[in-house]
Image (cartoon, rainbow, N blue to C red):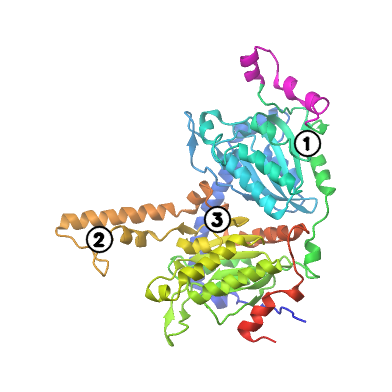
Amino acid sequence: MAKLILHPLGDSIDKALDPAVAKRNSEHLTTLEDALDAKRAEVRAGWGEKYVERVHAKGKLTTWERIERLKDDGSKVLPVGSMVNYGLTFGPDERTSPGAGVITAFVRVSGRLTMVIANDNTVASGSWWPLTPEKIERAQEMALKLRLPVIYLIDCSGLYLPEQGRTFPGKTGAGAIFKMNSLLSANGVPQIAGVFGDCIAGGGYMPIISDVVYMTEQAYMVIAGAALVKGGKSQKITSLDIGGPDVHVHLSNCADHRVPDDETCLRRIIGEIESLPTSAAPYYRRGFKTAPPRFPSSDLSSLFPVDHRHVYSVAQVLARLVDDGLFREIAPGIGQEMVCGVGRVGGLYTGFIANNPELTEHPVLRGEQRPGSILYRDGIAKISQFSRCCNDDGIPIVWLHDISGFDIGIEAEKQGLLGYGSSLIYTNSTNTVPMFTVLLRKASGAGYYAQAGMPYDPVVQLATCISRLAVMEGRTLSIGAFNTKLDDNFEIVADTQEERERIANGMEQVEARITADMDPIKAARQMDTDEIVRLDEIRAYLEVLIEASYQTYGYRRVKNPRIWSLHDIGILSEGDR
């Protein structure tokens, strides 16, 4: 009977790194992560205390207060999409839209993990801004892939009309939200809606396909609000008269229950979640319990060098992510620039595929080494097969990126890297097992795509404060852009000093622009990544994401470990018995 034996991994931080280096690395990360925390606080504050007071004056809770009352005591709310629209302004008044005016987060309610989608009522009364629909749809997509119950907390005054041209039309415009409502329903994913106030136009459609709809006494759902009705039909009437609970609970049956206030509504929603089946995660733990990593996740900030060109040990990273620091590497002697294997996260089996940035032995040229963080033939073949096996066995996959791209040159072309790369791309395009991507540091070129980057539909993609998402580094790109002006050693070729300075300035400008484009805040702002997390938060996010992968049973294949395909490649590659 096959059995997967996990082995201890890593060392304490004082053994892994020189204390002075660890201190320097940690101080650098602390500066970056403190800046991230400040931006998060800014987003969470919405439009500020003045608007919080307005909400309270109406006898209502703010959206964050509703979420805090909804979640289980002691549990953490894990947002996604926090930085969408960060730093941007809209409309003639140049208004900001923190978080695109909507909060999307994984929230544990009555022991079950849920996806909460909640209009921020401190930001233009929960209006929809550019990218608000896309952010809502992305959260719905996460819930659909994991079959997580969706809770809508609706307090929405409709589109922010000065920017309606950027939110209404198009494939991912506001109407796509309702398509996602329908797909969730068609796949049996529970949807529960609480309507706490304004619910106009598109916001009015949003709760209707939900399985259960609650309305407070201040809530109304309307295709058009009172102002529009007055203008179009010359009727003096309020929005509550048009579509309040009197109408939709007792006449139209568009809502199910009427409750007096926010607090009651939230308690009733909690009760709905309690009525759902309990999580299957304990069953899939197979008797194992959640255990912390062998070494604290806080060490991660010390492991990553200040200079992104310097290397670190990926084994030390994994030791701070998996339970007890226990890990089974698959085919460690093949394609050493890639590390893949199985560990537990929260007691649940998880596949990891990670770039190894360190120098590794050349597989053919004895005594020669080659740089890591590059996809070579053997490593591609190894992780392609590992990814297929995880998909066959039902093991969720975590991709840890620090990738510079595919190998290039005569040897790479002779070995058919294009073909091997297409095999990896095909595998990750057709996998049905949940996959999660973490951009630890570099995420460059087609290697980013091939390793289940955002275009390949990971359930969630996380970035860090040191993520560098781009086709290539700024310096490399500037060399490519000015290639005709350089010699074989990449030195500028010019007839005059003036021309030399012009070329040098042009290269510097290109490098600076590309480096600025690699800012993770910019990537998150335009939804090129889902969330920026502190390094010491990666483990917490993975615990939730992996548990969410196992919470619901019956919608995907999950084999018991005795019949894993992984055992076969372990034996074939290592001769294990």
Disc with the residue nearer the chain's start (1 vs 2): 1
Instruction: Classify residue 323 as left or right of residue 422.
Output: right
Q: In terms of secondary structure, where does tag 1 sit?
A: strand
What residue is rendered at 64% in x and 79% in y? 569
Three-letter amino acid code of the residue under disc 1: Val
Instruction: Classify residue 458 as left or right of residue 68.
Output: left
Q: Residue furthest left?
A: 496
Check if residue 85 falls in the magenta segment. Answer: no
Disc with the residue nearer the chain's start (3 vs 1): 1
Three-letter amino acid code of the residue under disc 3: Met
Q: In terms of secondary structure, where does tag 2 sit?
A: helix
Instruction: Classify residue 425 as left or right of residue 475.
Output: right
Q: Quadrant of the N terminus?
A: bottom right
From the image, tell me which residue sits under label 2: 484
What residue is rendered at 52% in x and 59% in y? 30
Quarter of the figure with residue 260: top right
**Highlighted range, magenta:** 226-254
> Which mark identifies residue 454?
3
From the image, tell me which residue sits under label 1: 213
Instruction: Classify residue 266 as left or right of residue 504.
Output: right
Q: In terms of secondary structure, where does tag 3 sit?
A: helix
Tags 3 and 2 touching, CB below 8 Å = no
